[in-house]
Image (cartoon, rainbow, N blue to C red):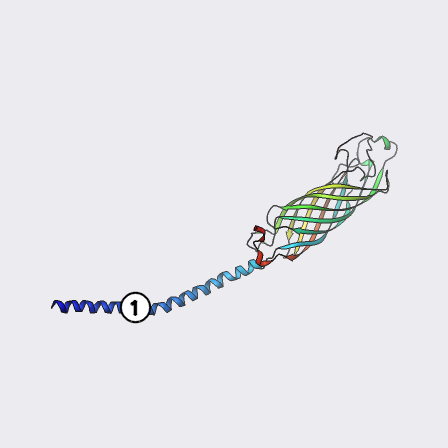
Amino acid sequence: MIIHFINKIASQRDKTISAASVAEVSLDPVLKVFARRLLALCLILFFPAYCLAQEDPEYKMEIGAGVGLMGYIGDFNANFTKDLQPMGTIMARYNFDTYMGLKFNASYGKIKGSSSDVKDYFPAFSNEKYTFDNTLIGAGVTFECNFWPYGTGQDYRGAKRLVPYLFGGMEMTYVDIKNGDKKNDISANIPLGLGIKYKIGKRMNLGVEWALHFSLCDYYDGKKDPFDIKSSGAFKNTDCYSALQVTFTYSFMARCKVCHNEDED
């Protein structure tokens, strides 16, 4: 009797193990099908976003031009909005990354003014006023720093289309003097300014910038020390000019897409 009971329990255990094995074998294909469908769903959801991120390349170079107004600031004028004259610029920009860049530019413009524009007394022009209409040709390099990363905003860096920036650098300026103590002059100036740029498209950039150019000479107006006061120092009794311009540049020379971590090295 006892032997019969033990055999019955063993038989039931074997049936249970066999059923579990069958269930495991039948469940395995179901898991495989589920895993395949889950993987396909993930690809459908995330692959377009990955492609979108890859469609926003980062360009090393820009080339373009700008037009605007420039104004003389010096002994014969202290008003930033008086006697503004047209100017033009051609430029090239090398972008180190989405924050910093180096701009090379060449500009052409005119400045004018008169001793009658100010209330100061000039001993040399007490009987007759002095006027000038000179031409400035400059070339230089400036370092630019953006407040935020610059781009279309579609890449993984979180770049923004509209970005303000600061810049400063060094330029050389040739002055063609029509009425003054000399016919021409060449001197250095230090431009400091700020601007804002907007990425119209992947390769097109629109900007507005303003700069004040601190000259190391006193011949922009053609006259040196019209007050007849001797002075010394790099920026004492020197002339300046302001420049406000709208720029348009085209981006090219994309960075290597597979080397997206090169800026992190």
With respect to residue 132, does 37 lie above or below? below
Q: Secondary structure at mark 1?
A: helix
How far across and how far down the image is residue 215, in percent?
76, 39
Name the side, left or right, on which 110 lies relative to 196. Answer: right
Residue at the farthest left position:
1
**Which residue does the image show at 76% across and 48% down from the upper left?**
107
Amino acid at pointer 1: Ser
Q: Nearer the viewer, residue 85 or 143?
A: 143
Mark 1 Cα within 10 Å, few/some/many (few <14, many 20+)?
Answer: few
User: Which corner quadrant of the image does residue 250 belong to?
Assistant: bottom right
How far across and how far down the image is residue 168, in percent?
68, 43
User: Which corner quadrant of the image does residue 180 belong to?
Assistant: top right
Name the side, left or right, on which 260 lies relative to 18. Answer: right
Residue with the mark numbered 1: 21
How far across and how far down the image is residue 104, in percent?
71, 49
Q: Nearer the viewer, residue 54 or 94?
A: 94
Quarter occupied by the N terminus:
bottom left
How far across and how far down the image is residue 5, in percent?
15, 67
Name the side, left or right, on which 133 lies relative to 154. Answer: right
With respect to residue 89, does 124 lie above or below? above
**Which residue does the image show at 84% across and 40% down from the upper left?**
132
**Which residue does the image show at 68% across and 54% down from the upper left?**
62
Residue at the farthest right position:
127
